[in-house]
Image: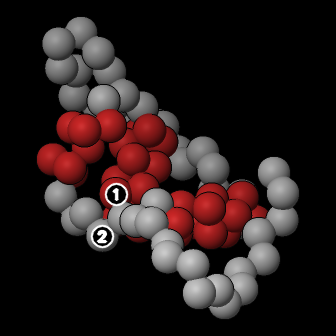
Amino acid sequence: MAQFTPRQTREPLTSQSGLALVESLLTRASMENPPNHLPTPKERGFTMTNSEIVLSMLGLLVQAKPDFEAIEPFR
């Protein structure tokens, strides 16, 4: 991954702009893979790992979407 260097710009930013910064911070903190030792509920035969749930929720929070229901458009 390329190094992330924030800088001021006059260009408009999209709601996904913060994802690159958060990815860079998680990589530096060695937290790309949160622990998967807790059980997760099975729904319709599909199981998400804890790391997928945590990273999905973090991605939503970075986009100012505090409800996990907002994940539906990304399925």
Residue behind mark 1: 60
**Residue displayed at 24% across by 9% down:** 45
Image quadrant where residue 72 sits: top left
| Residue visible at 52% across and 45% down in the picture | 35
Residue 28 drawn at (x, y percent) = 75, 65
Q: Secondary structure at mark 2?
A: loop
* Residue holding disc 2: 64
Towards the viewer: 50 or 4: 4
- Asked whether, in this view, residue 75 is left or right of residue 33, the answer is left
Label 1: state its secondary structure: helix
Residue found at the very far front of the displayed protein: 11
Is residue 17 found left or right of 66 in the rendered image? right
In screen coordinates, is 20 left or right of 17? Answer: right
Q: Nearer the viewer, residue 11 or 66?
A: 11
Whether residue 35 can be seen here: yes
**How many discs appear?**
2
Residue located 17% across and 12% down the image:
44
Residue 46 x, y percent position in the rendering: 29, 15
- Distance, label 1 to label 2, CA atoms, is 6 Å
Q: State the image coordinates of residue 37 (x, y, percent, origin top left).
A: 46, 37
Amino acid type at mark 1: Leu
- Residue 62 spot, x, y in % from top left: 41, 67
